[in-house]
Image (tube, helix red, strand yellow):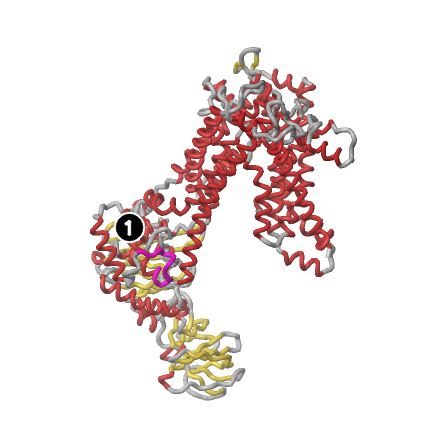
Amino acid sequence: MAEESAIFRLEGVTKTYGGVTALRDVSLSVSGNEYISLLGPSGSGKSTLLRVIAGFETPDRGRVFFNGRDITNIPAHERGIGFVFQNFALFPHLTVYDNVAFGLANGEKQVSRDEIDRRVREAIGLVGLAGMEGRGVHQISGGQKQRVALARTLVMAPSLVLLDEPLGALDANLRNRMRNELRSIRETLGVTFLHVTGSETEALAMGDRVVVLDRGRIAQFAKPDDVYAKPATPNVAHFLNRYNVFDGTLKDKTFTGPFGSLAVSATTPSDKSAYAVRYDRMQVEPDGSKGSGPAIPATFVASEYLGSSVMYFFETAEGKVIEVEHHLSLGAPKTYEPKSRYMLRWKPDDAIVFG
Amino acid sequence: MESRVLKPVLAVYVVLFILFLYGPFFVLGILSFQQGPEGGPQFPIIEWSTYWYRHIFGLTPPSRVAPLPLGESLFRSLTLAFMTMVTSTVLGVMSAQAFRKKFTGSGLVFYLIVLGMMVPGVLTGLGTSLLANNILGIERHWWSTAFVTHVVYTFPFAFLVMLAILNRFDGSVEEAAWSLGVSPWKTFRKVTFPLIFPGVLSAMLFAFTLSYDEFSRTLFASGRDQTLPLAIYGTFSVEIHPNVFAFGVLTTVFSFALLSVYAILMSLSVRRAKKIAMQEDIV
Amino acid sequence: MSVADTAPRPRKSNTWWLIAPGAIWMALFLVAPIALIVYVSFWTQTTFKIEPTLTLTSWKTFFGSDTYISSLFTTLRIWLIVLVTTFVIGYPTALFVGLFIKNKTLSTVLLVICVIPFWTSFLIRVLAWRPMLGKEGAINIILQKAGIISQPIEALLFTELSVIIGMTQIYVVFMVGPIAFMLGRIDPNIIEAARDLGAGFGRIFRKIIFPLSLPGVVVGAIFVSVMVLGEFATAAALSGRKVNLLGNIIVTQVGSLKWALASVVGVILTIVMGLVIAGFLRIVDLKREL
């Protein structure tokens, strides 16, 4: 990607909090009009990364560019980058209208009363809160609060909006509805969203591209289907919550793990050796079956019905839990005997080998 | 089992304890209605009267008991308390705001500020008098040297109140304001200050009442013109009359009036918050 | 781009601008004056003026005078007695408010009742003891009416006793508050568990309740000590000038413009207080406890 088209760019950003490194040498470049998901477990530094871009934190090293300008030393209020908080952070002493009007009315730039009114009503309409202008922000529901927070940010017409787990405080139903709305609002306005989340489904569903952060480093930056199908590291595979990841050693094109030694054809370069098989690529066979391909014996523990699929939980002799997903489109769910042994088998081509 | 015996015993004890705390006040209150001008500051009550209250306001014919020199000293005390309140609260808010970020030497500065409420008035009073009298060579006044020692005394209280308030303050609303392009100073004025205002009110109340009643520092540092506590102290050395008691009742009433205003202001803001919370439940 | 260019500047901080006014105020009007007391205690005092020629004369005067030495001992004696009385009188109240009252509202109400007297003038509170303790005061009248005594007790007012009574009443609340606070934080389950193990109240008190309330006792003791050691008004109003504390000496000396001697007493007072506070802080590590 040409750097001129990048809306924001990080160069070697490092941030340490009292000896703990939150971000290590992070470089990232994002173009305009894009929805970026930032996925990482808690403590991976994802919120820190967002706060560095917003200007709430100063990096120890590295630089931040926005619209071609070096903003590393520019204070937050002069950056023109929107920020949406998990806890909404609405101004509790102001009405919905005044919350949305706050930036226009109190900013450095003078905006006429008429223009403020027009833009505020437009933004409130955009997030579907028309008629609620006069309410206090304590008088509205959680989903409405996050809409106010969004309108408050969007009314400033930023070209980049940072969202810090914006749906984290909402219940599951509302979260699904808000996902669609966030996407459509972003597409209407053509702004870039950088959306931090700890939920792999949210990250994959919403992002045009997904950044996976692991212990302060970017582990992968790719389209959702690429991340899903080809995780770059064992940890990414683990975060996705779709892979059974086995530890082991890779030597001379042979992977030795809990299932014995297997010859492998293709490997993904990684600093850690691991063997990953997607949940839905595993077959359950009766104990002692002599099929072809790699397999591991395991004891059935429990199953969980998910609507379009069923998850089966098995446990190996070493106590490792293995999950097997059965899509209901492939046939009716099977029943297994708890505490009985089964053989879990997969095709060698479906495995991703790191090392 | 023992607590079944112990609890009522302790309850009776606490009643006696409260009697111990309040007893002198009742006696003082009763004696303030002593007959005047002949009635002295002791029992028995010759005849109930409001003579000594009228005496304070100069509504009685002149007698051998000189009226308390209250008018000007009351004015000075109120002015001084007001000046102290404003200065201490501003300093308290600023310092507490600074303490929201970690900075080198914060521990030292914390103790430096808190020391002001720990050091007894005789010492700060004496020290400030030495500074004014023997180093700077300036005259001491209630509005200069005494004011300075009052702030040294009340600023730590305002600081601690604001520190407690700001500790519970969620900084993300401020970050939200910055991200909307609003400068830190304007953010403080439009977001932070309105939200911490109940705390500011408490800090002001502390500073005002402490200064209004301050005595030992003022004794050293105020020079010739007396504040109200000094005027009362002046009556200690000469014979006391029930007019001092009547005055004690009046200042107590005044303090409670002040406290009530504060309580009403606070309960109004609490009730507003409650009303909002209730509406939230409805939605 | 060189390495120096890529190092971000630390954000310009306004912390110093916020903290400077308060810190400077305290340095100029608290630290400097107290340092000055030490300095002036070595100045040369003549009848009419004082000069910055360093001398030990005032110190010798202090330690050569029975009056001043005895005032030091009076101060220490009264401090110790008031410390004990505030503790003995205050602890049961704190025990009741902090531990026995389970209802939060009621314990708050009781604490507020204890604090309310502070909203009246300190001097009025002192003065209120006069009609209480006097020869024709309320206590003597009540005792006589009750037939306990036939002659009024004259030793009640204008003695050391009246000073101690007055100070105890004024400062006992500073003991009650911190102790009640610490007692209120005790997990009731601990006491319940001890009771289940068959421990009586006396044992539970000695082994659990008192040790856990100790930080509160220390904080209360520090409050009371600092205030009693710096006292002079109560002694002046209730002792009829018979009890002279270090504070009273300072007031008199400043009144007669004997700055150097007043400063000597000030330094001694500061040292005494420093020792007392340091001593209390050795008993309990407050930073860990609170």
Residue highlighted by disc 1: A103
Q: Secondary structure at mark 1?
A: helix
Q: Residue C80: horizontal and vertical position, in percent? A: 68, 33
Badge count: 1
**Is residue A143 part of the magenta span, yes or no?**
yes
Seen from the viewer's position, the closer of residues C47 and A348 is C47
Magenta residues span A134-145
Q: Residue C258: x, y in percent?
A: 57, 16
Relative height, residue A33 to residue B22 (above, below): below
- Check disc 1: other Cα within 10 Å, few if <14, some if 14-19, many if 20+: many
Q: For this rendering, which residue is in front, A169 or A316?
A: A169
Residue closer to the observer: A282 or A158: A158
Name the amino acid, label 1. Gly
User: Would residue C46 be found to the left or right of residue C152 on screen?
Assistant: left
Q: Residue at x 56, y 30 (%)?
A: B50
Q: Is residue C278 magenta?
A: no
Write the residue at 45% across / 82% down. Answer: A344
| Residue B265 pos. (x, y %) | 44, 44
Residue C164 at x, y percent in the picture: 68, 32
- Please tell me whether residue A157 is drawn above or below residue A306 in the rendered image: above
Q: Is residue B101 visible?
A: no
Q: Is residue C183 above or below residue A5?
A: above
The subunit carrying tag 1 is A
In the figure, residue A208 lies in which quadrant?
A: bottom left
Camera-nearest residue between A74 and C220: C220
Residue A228 visible within the image: yes
Left or right: where does residue C209 sit relative to residue A208?
A: right
